[in-house]
C-alpha cells in the first residue's frame, strides 16, 4: 500500500465474481502468478492478451504440484531449479517457457533452498516477461513424462531410525522449517532440525544413543552410520543447539530413540 497499489488475496478464485470483475477492469496485458496454489478459471486466463504465466519451483515436468521444493530435498535430489510456464486450467501442466537449474547443497534445508530459488526465480520471471514482450519466448510442451509433488502430511515427519543415515538427513532437511522431523524419547516428542552424518558405525540397534554429552554432542545410530545431532527442540520448548539442550536436559547413553 506504500506504493498505492491495491492488494487482493482471495481465498477462492472460481465463482468470485467481484475479484474477476476487478481483474477485467484492470485489463492487464499479462498476469504473473507466484506461490499461489490455486488454479485460475478460464474466465481469468483469457483476460490478458499475453496470457497468464506461473513461476514454478522445479525443473518441469518433474514435480508438478504443491510441494516441489520440499520433495526435491526429501528425495535427496542433487539439482533442482525454477521454470516459467503458460498457465492453463490444470495444475502446473502448461507449456514451458524458460528454466534455470541449480545444485542443491549438502545439508541445505527446504527453507534455505526456498530463499535461493526465490531470488533466482524473480530474475527468471523478469526475463520471461521481457521475452514475451519481444515475441521471442519459446513455448515447449511438457509431454506426459511428469512426476507429482503432493502436499506434505504430519505422518511422514516421524523418523524411522532403521534406514540409511542419508535418508534421515533428507527427511530432516526436507521438513526444515515447515514442520520438523521428530522422534520419541521417554514418551516425549523431540524434534531434530539439523544433523551431520559421521563416518562412524556402531553394532548397536538403530536409534541407539551412542553419545550424549554437552560438549561432544548427541550421536545416534542409524541402519548404516552414526549421525550427530546439531540442532534440536524438546517437547513444548524452543529450538536450540544440541550443546545448550544437553546442558539442561538429560539424555542417557544406551537408551533408544523410538
Image (spheres, rainbow, N blue to C red):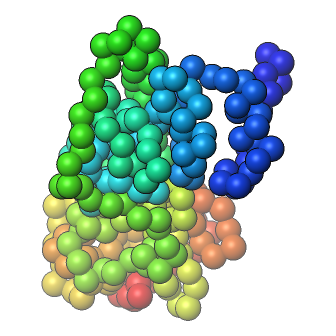
Q: Residue furthest top?
A: 134
Q: Image check: 165 left or right of 47?
A: left
Q: Is residue 120 visible?
A: yes
Identify the residue shown where x is 16% and y is 74%. Answer: 224
**Vertical position of residue 18 compared to residue 210: above or below:** above
In terms of depth relative to the viewer, which is nearer, 162 or 120?
120
Identify the residue shown where x is 24% and y is 34%. Answer: 140
Quarter-of-image position of residue 76: bottom left
State the image coordinates of residue 120 (x, y, percent, origin top left). Answer: 40, 26
Identify the residue shown where x is 60% and y is 43%. Answer: 43
In terms of depth relative to the viewer, which is nearer, 107 or 113?
113
In terms of depth relative to the viewer, which is nearer, 48 or 173?
48
Q: Residue furthest bottom?
A: 187
State the image coordinates of residue 137 (x, y, percent, origin top left). Answer: 32, 19
State the image coordinates of residue 167 (x, y, percent, origin top left). Answer: 26, 67
Quarter-of-image position of residue 121: top left
Q: Quadrant of the N terminus?
A: top right
Q: Quadrant of the C terminus?
A: bottom left
Q: Is residue 74 visible?
A: no
State the image coordinates of residue 82 (x, y, percent, origin top left). Answer: 35, 36
How many marks on residues? 0
In terms of depth relative to the viewer, which is nearer, 143 or 162?
143
**Vertical position of residue 164 compared to residue 71: above or below:** below
Identify the residue shown where x is 22% and y is 86%. Answer: 204
Quarter-of-image position of residue 19: top right
Amino acid at each position: 500500500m506504500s506504493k498505492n497499489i491495491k492488494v487482493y488475496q482471495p481465498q477462492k478464485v472460481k465463482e468470485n465474481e467481484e475479484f474477476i470483475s476487478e481483474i477485467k477492469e484492470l485489463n492487464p496485458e499479462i498476469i504473473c502468478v507466484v506461490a499461489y496454489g490455486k488454479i485460475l478459471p478460464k474466465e481469468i486466463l483469457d483476460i490478458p492478451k499475453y496470457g497468464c504465466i506461473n513461476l514454478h519451483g522445479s525443473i518441469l515436468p518433474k514435480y508438478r504440484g504443491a510441494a516441489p521444493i520440499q520433495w526435491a530435498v526429501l528425495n535427496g535430489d542433487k539439482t533442482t531449479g525454477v521454470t516459467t510456464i503458460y498457465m492453463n486450467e490444470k495444475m502446473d501442466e502448461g507449456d514451458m517457457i524458460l528454466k534455470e537449474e541449480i545444485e542443491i547443497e549438502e545439508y541445505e534445508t527446504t527453507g534455505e533452498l526456498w530463499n535461493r530459488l526465490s531470488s533466482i526465480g524473480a530474475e527468471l520471471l523478469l526475463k520471461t516477461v521481457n521475452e514475451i514482450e519481444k515475441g521471442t519466448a519459446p513455448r515447449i510442451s511438457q509431454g506426459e513424462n511428469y512426476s507429482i509433488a503432493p502436499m506434505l502430511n504430519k505422518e511422514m515427519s516421524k523418523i524411522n531410525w532403521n534406514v540409511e543415515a542419508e535418508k534421515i538427513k533428507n527427511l530432516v532437511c526436507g521438513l526444515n522449517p515447515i514442520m520438523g522431523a521428530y522422534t520419541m524419547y521417554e514418551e516425549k516428542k523431540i524434534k531434530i532440525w539439523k544433523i551431520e552424518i559421521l563416518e562412524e558405525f556402531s553394532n548397536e540397534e538403530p536409534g541407539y544413543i551412542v553419545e550424549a554429552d554437552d560438549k561432544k554432542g548427541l550421536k545416534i545410530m542409524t541402519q548404516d552410520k552414526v549421525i550427530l545431532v546439531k540442532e534440536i527442540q524438546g517437547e513444548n520448548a524452543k529450538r536450540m543447539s544440541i550443546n545448550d539442550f544437553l546442558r539442561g536436559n538429560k539424555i542417557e547413553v544406551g537408551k533408544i530413540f523410538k
